[in-house]
Image: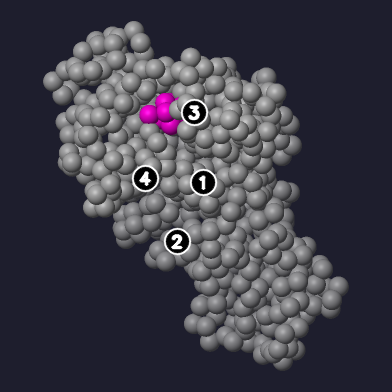
Amino acid sequence: MTTANTACPELFPLLDEVCGPKALRDLPPGMLTALAAEIRAFLLAKVTAVGGHLGPNLGTVELTLALHRVFDSPHDTLLFDTGHQAYVHKILTGRAAGFGSLRQAGGLSGYPSRAESVHDVIENSHASTALGYADGLAKARQLAGEGDRAVVAVVGDGALTGGMAWEALNNLGAAPDRPVIVVLNDNARSYAPTVGALAHHLRRLRVEVRGSGGGCPGAPAPGRGAIGPLPAARTLFELLGFAYLGPVDGHHIPALEETLCIARDLRMPAVVHVVTVKGKGYAPAEGDLAECMHAVGVIDPQTGRPAQAAAVPTWTQVFAGELCALGERHEDVVAITAAMPGPTGLARFQRRFPDRCFDVGIAEQHAVTSAAGLAMGGLHPVVAVYATFLNRAIDQVLMDVALHRLPVTFVLDRAGITGPDGPSHHGMWDLTFLGAVPGLRVAAPRDAAQLRELLAEAVADTSGPTALRFPKASVGADLPALRRHGVVDILHRTGDRDVLLVGIGPLAGAACTAAADLAAHGIGVTVVDPRWVLPVPAELTDLAAGHRLVATVEDNTRCGGIGAAVTRALADAGATVPVQVLALPGHFLPHGSRAGILAAAGLTTDGITQRVLGAVNSPPALAEAPVTPAKRPV
């Protein structure tokens, strides 16, 4: 047997032998417990050293072992919803040696990746989607006459709160001739504890069913880790047309294998309810730090604490503090989170104002429309989500909020490049989408002082919806303005009015440094921060028209965004000044460090300087470009 999985046979001898699913199936059952222990030790060693999703994967070790022993991947299709719990799947499909570069540029992805392995089928890491993929794949298998190829979707109880999951269940349960197996990994958490009526139903199943033993012919006997279902179709899943098997102890491999075999042989849609412990086997991840252990940076494996304390606050932390301050001053301010109070900074507000903070589960569409209802009731909702997840609710932003001109504020964390989480988590489309929404004002603070100021302006705005965006990063030093022209801050001015540099959000700092470099080349530069970036302020258009060249700098895709909006605004004003758009390329970007990805896109001081120099030195020459007089004195 080839031993080439971990590259550390002396530390993980058993795991090193399991270089693929077949090797795992050939392993004697009596060795599985030892293998599970090695996998947990491997995960702790690797993930704490480089960062990644720790808790979800520690909780799915035995479940993933059972799945790969019962089903024959890739002939059978295993789909992992969200994907952050697929590390064990990667290990068992021959990729353990790559964990030293997990989520680093050119290294192993932190999510399933079709480019990495034939065992990875989907790589969209947005939650609640796997059941929809499963429905389509099962239909394709049926039409192709491939009824021997099982389709298995692993979905967490947190992800099952999403509307897409129920749209898929509605179709799956109504098709008894398409036997999709839904493995419900129930650990009672997403980031935070799972909320809502479904969580109550699953809790009832865990409590009332456990120990009953009966209800399913051939179900494993009580006391061996698996328990039979409630009689007389008393589960929601049975009422929807599924066979229900469980709850099953998700850390008892024999029970898992036996129950999965039953589900496979039923040849009808089935839900296997598996109860697991998130962070299993690692005390910090099972205890008070459970939410923090969902995804970690480099941490001390002994304590679970960060290896090095952050020297400066993050954007999220600044937002968290300011929202609480606004909550103290404005009783109409309420907050909404889609299952992520901690990561979006709302946990502090939730503790201070528990009756004014609403966790709706992983349901961004519902979060936005619920916010619309709150605004109709006279409140000012603040919806805090990752920028990439607001993509899922653009229709609701457009039709449910903006059409009604409702005062809802969207706070978009992780805007721009997020780094190691890769293409599905980069928040690089929000300015493009939101720029098309009538009546929506978007702000991009450049520093902590502006975040506080702009958030206060947003929640005071009763005319319609507003949005703020900021990155996943530490906040740099405040960047004071020379003066304010309307809503636009003028940050830097040297020499003639050759170039207007428009720095969006935190990239304003790099624009100012580039301006100093350009001055050494004899180029006069004005650097401005629009603050409210969409719609394009009239003051910005006036300033732009008074320069020979405009360069916009943003961490949004070049397709749409601020550069496109400024170009359009200048054309509408009849100005002929050329515009250079410095932004992210219009394709999916891989995982890597935030700094490295921004550098590759030219969104650094050097990149800005070289791009402007290139534009200045290319025909038509800068000196030949006409200057349109500004409409207002600046």
Q: Amino acid at mark 4?
A: Thr
Q: CA distance from mark 4 to mark 2?
A: 23 Å
Instruction: Kindly indicate the quadrant of the structure image that contains residue 48.
Output: top right
Provide the residue span drawn in magenta: 63-70
As drawn, 336 above or below 614: above
Quadrant for the N terminus in the image:
top right
Label 2, residues with CA under 10 Å away: few <14, some 14-19, many ≥20: many
- The residue beneath circle 4 is 129
Closer to the camera in the image, 160 or 568:
160
Q: Amino acid at mark 1?
A: Ser
Tell me if I can see residue 134 in this picture.
yes
Q: Position of residue 97 (x, y in %)?
A: 64, 37
- Please state if 349 lies on the left or on the right of 6 as rendered: left
Q: Which residue is mark 1?
A: 117
Query: Closer to the camera: disc 4 or disc 2?
Result: 4
Asked if residue 360 is positioned above or below residue 221 in the image, the reply reads: below
What residue do we see at 34% from left, 31% from top? 183
Q: Which mark is residue 24?
A: 3
Measured in 3D between alpha carbons, the distance from the residue under mark 4 to the one under mark 1, in whole angstroms, is: 20 Å
Say which amino acid is labelled 3.
Leu
Q: Secondary structure at mark 2?
A: helix
In depth, the one of 37 and 384 nearer the eye is 37
Q: Residue 490 appears at what percent x and percent y? A: 69, 66
Mark linked to residue 434: 2
SS class, disc 3:
helix
Real-space Cα distance between discs 3 and 1?
17 Å
Question: Residue sitting at 60 percent across and 50 percent down?
Answer: 591
Q: Quadrant of the C terminus?
A: bottom right
Q: Percent x, y for residue 491?
A: 72, 64
Marks 3 and 4 close (CB-CB < 8 Å): no
